[in-house]
Amino acid sequence: MSQQPTERVDRDEDRDKDPELPSNEVTEGVDRAPHRAMFRAMGYDDEDLSSPMVGIANPAADITPCNVHLDDVAASAYDAVDGTGGMPIEFGTITISDAISMGTEGMRASLISREIIADSVELVAFGERIDGLVTIGGCDKNMPGMMMAAIRTDLPSVFLYGGSIMPGEHGGREITIQNVFEGVGAVAEGEMSEDELDEMERNACPGAGSCGGMFTANTMASIAEALGFSPLGAASAPAEDEARYEEAARAGRLALEAIEDQRTPSDFLSRASFENAIALQVAVGGSTNAVLHLLALAAEAGVDLDIETFNEVSARTPKIASFQPGGQYVMNDLHEVGGVPVVLRELHDAGLLDGDALTVTGRTIAEELERIDPPRIEDLDVDYLQTVDE
């Protein structure tokens, strides 16, 4: 269990626990004394037991750099919940590393892991009578799996991305895992020595985080903002940047707000939010795996979405960003100029985004864009973003 903070906000009468919350079934009444005894064994006190219970679903693992740091990310969310008058309960689930299993029979496990992640988080939330969730994702299938679980439970939920890896350096230039994959082909063609490939291998991935291009993880993290599952600006901060831990704390606080307002995924997921997600995916040149995952999320949410919708939205939405693998740049480059909201603003201003779609904050995406006022692409001096008109 994560360490509790040294200071905690006292709960006042306005934050009294809702008598209808699921956790009351295991914390309230004389007949629940044995249940409370179990909680006290883990260090929870009277204040905790009279607070909303927030589950923090954490797929931390040494299997992949995407997830290796997630205990620290989860701890920031945990402390924010604890310090804002909630009762945080952290629990784990699995992950598969697509990058490491790729090219082997092990890749058969990848998509199945999405379902197991969703099932396991759903079961814990149901079985332990949790009031709300912060679901954390790192590697590819974590992302849709966590959101699927939140939709199934329809508990107040916030999706939190673990962040992407920073570029490495080789020969005086930035490199990523994509360069290593390409290097394998270059060696096979006799265009690169094995020694140079070895140097690239040792320098391409300098630390924790998901692959830096607009591959599945970053695509789905960006889509989480467009869907309303994550607050705007949450996706782009690098994994080991202080801003990532600030986002984790924000997610914890927002989960408590959502519990207080009883704001659940069914309140903000709609046909419009899914079309917004598709528009963003097209605009950033995101992974086509998003098709597979968005169809699954829509099915869980009871939203009518089919493959033809992707054709319709794609036909009216231009690609306005140049990120790997189709371009040259990575998520950190987008973060430096304002993150995903920069792209969302461009789409909204061009009439390609439904601004009335609600988000996890309870505000519309248009209201959120107005609040944070991200830069306009036309005012940025970068060559990896274009306006819709360009």
Image: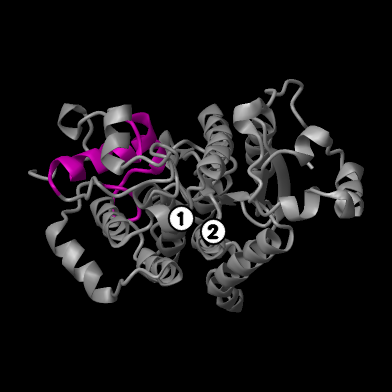
Q: Position of residue 310 (x, y in %)?
A: 24, 68
* Secondary structure found at label 1: helix
Q: Residue at x 49, y 39 (%)?
A: 166
Q: Which residue is at a point 77% across and 31% down the rendered structure image?
A: 4
The residue where tag 2 is placed is 150
Residue 86's image quarter?
top right
Spot occupied by residue 303 in the image (x, y as percentages of width and height): 35, 68
Q: Nearer the viewer, residue 255 or 281?
A: 255
Which of the 4 image quadrants contains residue 339? top left
Q: Amino acid at mark 1?
A: Pro
Question: Could you tell me which quadrant the C terminus lies in?
Answer: top left
Q: Residues within 10 Å of mark 2 (few under 14, many from 20)?
A: many
Relative to 159, residue 333 above or below: above
x, y (%) of residue 50? 75, 39
Q: Which mark is residue 265?
A: 1
Residue 2 appears in the rendering: no
Which residue is the extreme one toward the left?
Answer: 389
Residue 151 appears in the rendering = yes
State how many labels appear: 2
Residue situated in front as seen by the camera: 115 or 61: 115
Question: Neighbour class for label 1 at 10 Å: few (<14), some, many (≥20)?
Answer: many
- Looking at the rendering, the stretch of residues picked out in magenta corresponds to 322-351
Labels 1 and 2 touching (C-beta < 8 A): yes
Q: Is residue 137 left or right of residue 345?
A: right
**Where is the N terminus found, in terms of image quarters?**
top right
Q: Is residue 135 left or right of residue 62?
A: left
Q: Amino acid at mark 2?
A: Ala
Is residue 324 covered in magenta?
yes
* Nearer to us in this view, 178 or 148: 148
N-term-proximal mark, 1 vs 2: 2
